[in-house]
Image (spheres, helix red, strand yellow):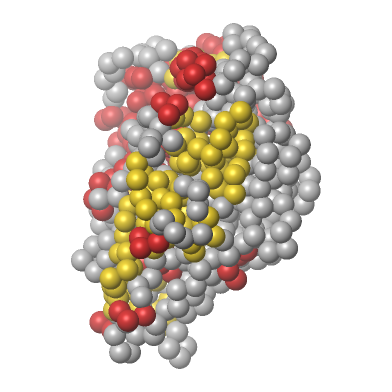
């Protein structure tokens, strides 16, 4: 792993970052006096192609096209080595060779505080850590090696093919790459195909490498590998090694080869998924329980009954097998989809027309779709794989199109961006997918990359650090207070002043005693994340301030290595004559709107205020709305709408809502 980022800034390490840094120079010259010279922008890359050479040597040894070996590895790990740590599915090294029996035996991730995933207005259902899928204190299940599916035990097969000890395949990158090459060569041989030098002739072997048990999953994986081959890739991995795969251009992959794998071909599942992904239906039970209680979601009629406005991204804090076991429990909570880490396979559990209990905020539940991703937020090396990012991005893009949800960070939220409903619920809100989720890459895969818009005088900034080189110190990944391993992050840390040694911003909702936020990986109190937009509150050389939780929050933003992009849009300020205004965690109607038989939901402000003179980035104007689903019979459910309307704002790390009657909304550049 690379060391932490120097306090004085980091030189551009990728072409994308270099372009952003170069573009920032002109903007910075208009805003800031030049203080000192930046670090050398052309610093030599760490490593001189050692990993690239290892790919070449393994490809030659096993007569596999080097481009195919590189593309498979990119899909599995983006060429990262993860310091020898296993993935959530027990995969090791750049080839993601799986040895789940070894990995899971010692994998007991830290627990995140639980929260009511459904919300205060619904029957209580206690969620577990992270995405809500592991009960407090429950360790991941560890099946016997013989019970594991083939996709979770590829490393022992690679050891047998290469004659290398399993430990070396887990711990040494050269041997790991050799193991991956041996598996591809063996798959080609099993298909009765020659060791061709043409990438097109390896489609079946690549599909087999996925370890999938059905043709749809195997084909989806191979299609993505060949897309990487077609377009090419280049990056510096987590060990500082520069790896390059030139674009192949036009290809004619032999998709007919997949039939030779003898995999099952499941019938159409009826799941709501794009045709380019592997998807199945694993329904969550809608079932009556004791008394008036029921689970584990609500049957509805969206979008006729309500519009879905948000897509919420979670991680499972558990394995695929544990997650699917829990979704079938009628007494547990629910979510709409789960995405598997190893190959991006998707399972749909709750139709998008229905309301899943996933976000810990009933207002957000009723207006959202929840997607879980197999992984652990506090273990960055328990990998969010490239294939998982790609299939999830396709799913989000598909859902956004069908449900008319804009592809931006005001509508595509992390669970850690969902607000508490009342002051008492804030501490229990979940923090997944956490600071290691790569939002910039995710939106690039959706075809909606974050770009500068508005220049230096647009009044807003988009948080946009370079993920691979942005390494703020986090603690608590393994034990409270202990430093996490250095790792790329899409988040920046916020201070009370323009200096690394100034205190962090306070979050009175998380800490009513007024103590500062911390560097804990689950502490969202002083954190701004990629794609979020904030109104500019000040600038000093190397530092930018934004309005955040009612305070002026500063973060390091040197012109030679910027962590923001200029933006413009709408901002909300308190209406003239108001000293400050309340903010809310839900957008409920006024009490006069509730019909007889539907209990009035109190509109309780959160323990924050939005003072006069401050401004916050605005999402859409939304109606005050409440879904009453107090019993098992969907016919008795009611949607209450009032005259009061709200604006969604980016108030802190989480979004919040303000009454339209309390604010003035105007363009940010004025």
**Residue lying furthest left:** 304
Query: Residue at the spot x=64%, y=60% of the render?
Result: 508
Residue 360 is left or right of residue 406, and the answer is: right
Q: Which x, y percent locates residue 80? A: 58, 28
Position above or below: 368 against 618: below
Instruction: State the image quarter where residue 495 is shown.
Output: top right
From this viewpoint, is residue 418 visible? no
How many marks can you see?
0
Between 558 and 378, the one nearer to me in the picture: 558
Residue 488 is left or right of residue 518, and the answer is: left
Q: Which x, y percent locates residue 37? A: 65, 11
Q: Which x, y percent locates residue 399? A: 30, 49
On-image quarter of the N terminus: top right
Residue 121 is left or right of residue 159, and the answer is: left
Between 575 and 152, the one nearer to me in the picture: 575
Query: Residue at the spot x=25%, y=82% of the render?
Result: 635
Position above or below: 556 against 602: above
Query: Residue at the spot x=63%, y=21% of the render?
Result: 10
Between 433 and 162, the one nearer to me in the picture: 433
From this viewpoint, is residue 611 visible? yes
Q: Which x, y percent locates residue 357? A: 44, 67
On-image quarter of the C terminus: top left
Residue 240 is left or right of residue 628, and the answer is: right
Between 458 and 589, the one nearer to me in the picture: 458
Instruction: State the image quarter where residue 55 is shown.
Output: top right
Instruction: State the image quarter where residue 195 is shown.
Output: top left
Query: Residue at the spot x=49%, y=72% of the render?
Result: 604
């Amino acid at each position: 792993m690379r060391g932490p980022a120097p306090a004085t800034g980091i030189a551009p390490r990728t072409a994308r970052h270099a372009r952003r840094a170069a573009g920032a120079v002109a903007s910075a010259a208009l805003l800031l006096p030049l203080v000192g010279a930046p670090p050398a922008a052309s610093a030599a890359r760490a490593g001189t192609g050692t990993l690239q050479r290892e790919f070449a040597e393994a490809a030659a040894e096993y007569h596999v096209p080097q481009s195919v070996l590189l593309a498979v590895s990119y899909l599995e790990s983006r060429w990262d080595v993860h310091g020898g740590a296993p993935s959530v599915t027990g995969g090791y090294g750049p080839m993601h060779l799986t040895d789940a029996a070894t990995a899971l035996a010692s994998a007991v991730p830290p627990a995140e505080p639980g929260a009511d995933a459904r919300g205060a207005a619904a029957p209580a259902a206690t969620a577990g850590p992270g995405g809500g899928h592991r009960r407090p204190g429950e360790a991941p299940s560890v099946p016997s090696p013989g019970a594991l599916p083939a996709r979770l035990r590829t490393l022992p097969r690679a050891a047998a093919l290469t004659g290398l000890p399993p430990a070396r395949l887990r711990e040494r990158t050269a041997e790991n790459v050799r193991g991956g090459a041996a598996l591809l060569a063996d798959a080609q041989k099993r298909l009765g195909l020659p060791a061709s030098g043409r990438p097109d002739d390896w489609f079946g072997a690549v599909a087999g490498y996925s370890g999938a048990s059905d043709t749809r999953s195997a084909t989806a994986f191979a299609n993505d590998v060949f897309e990487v081959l077609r377009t090419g890739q280049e990056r510096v991995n987590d060990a500082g090694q520069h790896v390059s795969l030139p674009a192949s251009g036009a290809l004619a992959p032999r998709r007919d080869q997949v039939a030779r794998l003898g995999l099952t071909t499941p019938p159409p599942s009826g799941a709501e998924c794009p045709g380019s992904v592997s998807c199945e239906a694993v329904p969550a039970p809608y079932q009556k329980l004791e008394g008036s209680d029921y689970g584990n979601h609500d049957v509805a009629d969206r979008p006729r009954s309500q519009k879905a406005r948000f897509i919420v991204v979670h991680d499972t804090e558990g394995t695929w097998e544990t997650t699917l076991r829990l979704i079938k429990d009628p007494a547990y909570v629910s979510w709409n989809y789960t995405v598997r880490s190893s190959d991006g396979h998707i399972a749909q559990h709750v139709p998008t027309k229905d309301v899943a209990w996933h976000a810990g905020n009933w207002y957000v539940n009723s207006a959202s779709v929840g997607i879980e991703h197999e992984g652990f937020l506090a273990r960055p090396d328990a990998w969010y794989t490239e294939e998982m990012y790609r299939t999830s991005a396709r799913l989000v893009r598909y859902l956004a199109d069908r449900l008319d949800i804009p592809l931006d960070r005001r509508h595509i939220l992390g669970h850690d961006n969902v607000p508490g409903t009342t002051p008492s619920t804030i501490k229990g809100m979940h923090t997944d997918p956490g600071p290691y989720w790569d939002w910039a890459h995710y939106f690039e895969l959706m075809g909606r990359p974050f770009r500068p818009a508005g220049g230096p005088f647009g009044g807003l900034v988009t948080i946009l650090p370079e993920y691979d080189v942005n390494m703020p110190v986090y603690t608590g990944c393994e034990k409270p207070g202990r430093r996490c391993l250095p790792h790329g992050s899409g988040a920046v840390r916020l201070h009370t002043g323009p200096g690394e040694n100034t205190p962090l911003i306070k979050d009175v909702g998380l800490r009513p005693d007024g103590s500062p936020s911390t560097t804990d990986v689950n502490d969202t109190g002083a954190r701004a994340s990629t794609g979020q937009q904030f109104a500019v509150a000040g600038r000093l050389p190397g530092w930018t301030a934004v309005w955040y939780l009612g305070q002026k929050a500063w973060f390091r933003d040197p012109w030679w290595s910027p962590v923001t992009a200029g933006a413009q849009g709408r901002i909300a300020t308190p209406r003239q004559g108001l000293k400050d205004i309340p903010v809310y965690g839900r957008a409920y109607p006024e009490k006069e709107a509730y019909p007889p038989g539907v209990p009035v939901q109190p509109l309780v402000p959160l323990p924050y205020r939005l003072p006069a003179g401050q401004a916050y980035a605005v999402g859409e104007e939304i109606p005050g709305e409440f879904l009453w689903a107090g019993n098992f019979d969907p016919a008795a459910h009611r949607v209450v709408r009032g005259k009061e309307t709200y604006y969604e704002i980016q108030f802190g790390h989480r979004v919040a809502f303000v009454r339209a009657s309390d604010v003035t909304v105007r363009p940010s550049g004025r």
